[in-house]
Image (cartoon, helix red, strand yellow):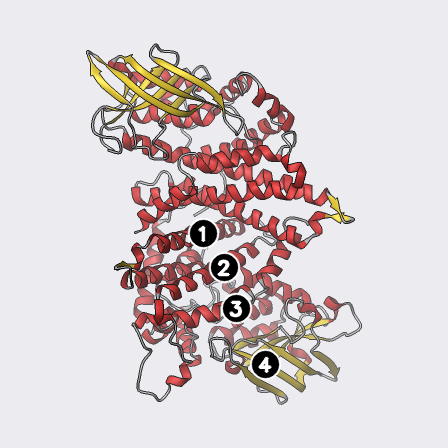
Amino acid sequence: MDLSFSKEDLAFRDEVREFLQNSLPPDVKDRCDRGLHPTREGQIRWQKILHEKGWMAPNWPKEYGGTGWSITQKYIAAHEFGQASAPIATPFGVSMVGPVIYTFGNQEQKDQYLPRILASEDWWCQGYSEPGSGSDLASLQTKAVRDGDDYIVNGQKIWTSYAHYADMIFCLVRTDPKAKQQEGISFLLIDMKTPGITVKPIYGIDKENSLNEVFFEDVRVPVKNRIGEENKGWTYAKFLLGNERTGIARVARSKRQVVRVREIAAAEMSGGRPLIEDPDFIAKLTRIEVDLMALEYTELRMLSMLANGKKLSAEPSLLKIRGTEIQQRLTELMVESLGMYGAPYEPERDYAGRNDIHPGPDYAHGPMAEHLYLRAATIYGGSNEIQRNIVSKMVLGL
Amino acid sequence: MDFELSDEQGMLKDSVERFVKDNYSSEARAKLADSEAGFSEDHWKMMAELGWLGMPFAEEVGGFGGGAVETAIMMECMGRGLVLEPFLATVILGGGLVTEAGSADQIEAIIPAVIEGNMKLAFAYAEPKSRFDLNNVETTASKSGDGYVLNGHKSVVYHGTAADKIIVSARTSGNAMDEDGISLFLVDNGASGLTRRDYRTVDGQRAADFTLENLKVGADALLGVEGKAYPVIEKVVERAIGALCAEAVGAMQQANEITNEYIKERKQFGVPIGKFQVLQHRMVDMYMEAEQSKSMSDMVAMKLSLEDEKERKRAVAAAKAQVGKAAKFVGQQSIQLHGGMGMTDEYSIGHYFKRLTTIEMLFGNTDYHFKKFAELSA
């Protein structure tokens, strides 16, 4: 057992730090630090800079354009990105569909899609949830019927993050309605420009449009856009969900949030002294910090197991559960720390063309928006209740 | 960065695991806990023969030169069986103080005997009013001729009954709460002027309160530099906290496994109660608390050797806070999930609950360490 960094690791840390200092656009950093949704343009501009540096896909195998970083280097990079409020690449392409393509896709699919993900030429979105299929994902109804070299897709997806930005969608569709639920599903890659696709915005409790409904009406999708075998899509879908859980702890971001809470609480006054000196406030922050530290070392312990060739079953669900709980507790505390200036709130588009800024101190712009959006954290990616079911079954055998 | 055990560490783990499996069935432990001494001299000899009592000591004095990681490995295994022998009191606390503060003569006189299993130690630091503050020392040691005269009251000294020598913290100058002016003394158990009251503790172990009345000791009883013992005490207690965290992790993991098995077997309404989602989710929360504690225990074992005092202390406070919180939750919920069975003295789970309850309070409870962590983070 050893927690120390080698000289090479420290040099790597300096390299990451310097790169972020010099290359992260200030406007992108500012939105990320405040916890606001990225703009499409800003996110792509930043991802192209990452791609040029060769750092777009730390988790991919080197042969497909991964960085070849060790576990320790990945940890260092994540930590530095978090500290600098540098956005990570949007997950739908590089973290979700990318690994599915290089693991289960054919050569043509790898050649066609992987370089475009790395170069941010395609913005991907995820067509999983449906109005009647949330936590019970395998009950999905969107169907694809074979017609020559095409599938004809009909149905509806919902809660599709950034579908209004997307060039491509990966979709779970039912190809065999007679088979048992999990066995009649296929995994399709669909061009969002295909006729018959309609995207309708959903405005969230944060009054922003990050979520959407996606409608499919007689959408023709070439059979060659199917990943792997017909009716085996559930296998690929589960693989993807497993991948999704490992990055979801967001420890580095939460560590940055602790610093922001401390900064705000040092500036805010309560009972004639800085809020940060209020014992009740500090007790709450301290408990979150200790939980976060334990989570950080749990994540490292799991990464270390993986690096030593051990297999994990549902242990990463713990990272998802605790990580999202901590994210929510931190934004809640951040909003609390603002006092009355937690209340002023208007969606960003209402500021467009107006010559004013958010009322109150500068740091008051952001926390409530993130607090609202992050209520979804314990719901998305498999709700925390579903994660507990998974651990109960897979780890505890109940 | 690596959390894996080396081959040697893996062998140590196997060996302690085997000892616990062979000697610490729930019935065997209950019998030992009820015996006169509260632990087994045979086990103690076995531990000496296996080299465990010498694990953390330097090779020059006959030890194996192990560190906090080796200690944690052993304590975690011992926690699984709720081992009763005074390993923490003698080897980690007593042995730690002697090697950190002692003169060459004192080390030579004590450590080899400890390693061979021929001498037991206990550390008398707490007092009726000190609560968890190691610097709150009202027991006095005044110079008298070549030696000192000690007066005061030392409370809840774990394994104070079995120890051959008691290491007493006493004030040679300053006021209660001063960090400066605290000294350590080696006192023979049974020395005249030392009155001992033996009792059992709720976790099945043994402890004692000591009254010191004009207890005379020679100059050679002073352990370390007069008045400068506080940093040594802090350092050794940090190691003891690391060891306790590991013990708690073992105890929590075992308690969780026992409970998990129980809810798979216990049937109500025609099904195993483990089929009820409310119990499944509770069990998952218990599992997560134990895992988070394991991560903190490993972390602190690796950080105990850090030179950076602030980071080391922060790690210790965070680990004990997490472990304390988890120990209460896992212990209490283990009883809850067992229903009436969890309330019986005969069944093992209650004993895990009780040891986890005392670990939470030893060397500072959860609130104490959260506060400490907050001070160190400000």
Q: Foreground mark, 3 or 4?
A: 3
Residue A268 lies, in percent from the top left, at 29, 64
Residue at mark 1: A291
Report in which chain the residue with disc 2 lies.
A
Q: Foreground mark, 4 or 2?
A: 2
Residue at mark 2: A325
Marks 3 & 4, CB-CB < 8 Å contact: no
Instruction: Name the residue nearer the viewer: A369 or A162.
Output: A369
Between the residue at mark 4 and the residue at mark 1, the CA separation in whole angstroms equals: 36 Å
Sequence-wise first label, 3 or 4:
4
**Residue B229 image label:** none
Q: Secondary structure at mark 1?
A: helix
Q: Amino acid at mark 3?
A: Ala
Instruction: Name the residue nearer the viewer: A12 or B365.
Output: B365
Query: Vertically, is A39 above or below B45?
Result: below
Residue at mark 4: A213
Residue at mark 3: A376
Sequence-wise first label, 2 or 1:
1
Label 2: how many Cα within 10 Å (few below 14, some 14–19, many 20+):
many
Between the residue at mark 2 and the residue at mark 1, the CA separation in whole angstroms equals: 10 Å
Question: Is B207 situated left or right of A264 in this image?
Answer: right
Residue B87 lies, in percent from the top left, at 47, 25
Marks 2 & 1, CB-CB < 8 Å contact: yes
Q: Amino acid at mark 1?
A: Asp
Q: Secondary structure at mark 3?
A: helix
Is the same chain shared between marks 1 and 3? yes
Between the residue at mark 4 and the residue at mark 2, the CA separation in whole angstroms equals: 27 Å
